[in-house]
Amino acid sequence: MSTLITALVAALVVTTIANTGTTVYLHRALSHRAVTLHPLAALVFRASLWVTTGIKPRQWVAVHRKHHAFTDVEGDPHSPVLLGWIKVQITNVGLYRAALSDPDLIPRYARDIEVDRWDRLFFDRNYTGLLIGIGTLVAVFGPATGLLAAFLHANIYLAGNAAVNAIGHHFGRRPYDNSATNLQWLAFATMGEGLHNNHHAAPSSPRLSHRRTEIDPGWWVIRTLQAVRLARPRFEDIRLTARARAART
């Protein structure tokens, strides 16, 4: 039992690190340019994502931007409206890979994300990053606990990201006129990403919480980085899209 508890705690810590990099770096900084990160902070996020997820940032950005271009209509890489939320929840990784099979995806949606020397030397070697991450867990906790922690982390992280795409477009509150939803419990689990209806209403805003009762842990990270001059938010307030403003009035 102690092995399971230790592995679970380690997995939750690693998943939190991965979720922080996903929401702050991949989503808010790269995909929407909602925050500008100091090169040192950006490098730390890239390295942490490399060893915890193996994600190539330009691929993630391209898939996400296409989702915004075709939200819940034909062309959306992972729409529960078109496919059903259960299918998106279960097959989200497969849908992500299917979107990446389009050779025009990255040139069209992520041409601003350049391949640099860090990518060529390290970050494009995604399996190497994952092996380093797993190896670190094994070295710190031993083979049984380390491998179990890696297994739990992979499943928790993938399930949380799938839930944003699946549950976050099906269940929950819709304060704005769009097909995404707000789920505070999912926001806690994904460092703010569960406030998905808010995000679709204001995609260029770095803060996903729009009301006092909403909590966005990813925004706390950005504010902390801002305090030490490692981040600069694009806006300090919420900038709604024209559609969201019109619906509000």
Image (spheres, grey):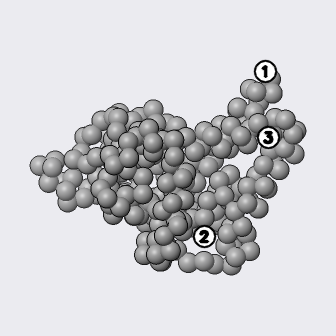
- The answer to whether one can see residue 164 in this image is no
Q: Nearer the viewer, residue 212 or 12?
A: 12
In the rendered structure, find residue 147 and report the number of the disc placed on it: 3
Whether residue 92 sits left or right of residue 15 in the image: it is left
Q: Are marks 3 and 2 in contact (CB under 8 Å)?
A: no
Q: Residues within 10 Å of mark 3 (few under 14, many from 20)?
A: some
Question: x and y percent of residue 233 in the render?
Answer: 43, 61
The x, y position of residue 33, in whole percent, is 43, 66
Name the image quarter holding residue 39.
bottom right
User: Which circle marks residue 121 in the picture?
Assistant: none
* Mark 1, residue position: 1
**Label 1 secondary element:** loop
Query: What residue is rendered at 81% in x and 35% in y?
Result: 145
Q: Residue at x 51, y 60 (%)?
A: 98
Does label 3 or label 2 sit earlier along the sequence?
2
Q: Earlier in the sequence, mark 2 or mark 1?
A: 1
Name which residue lies at 78% across and 49% down.
134
Q: Is residue 40 left or right of residue 23?
A: right
Label 2 amino acid? Pro
Numbered disc 2: secondary structure = helix
Label 2 close to label 1 by CB (< 8 Å): no
Give the position of the N terminus as an image quadrant. top right
In the current view of this chain or complex, which residue is farthest to the left? Answer: 249
Read off the residue under disc 2: 39
Identify the image quadrant of residue 59.
Answer: bottom right
Depicted 85 relative to depicted 58: above or below: above
Residue kind at label 3, given as amino acid type: Leu
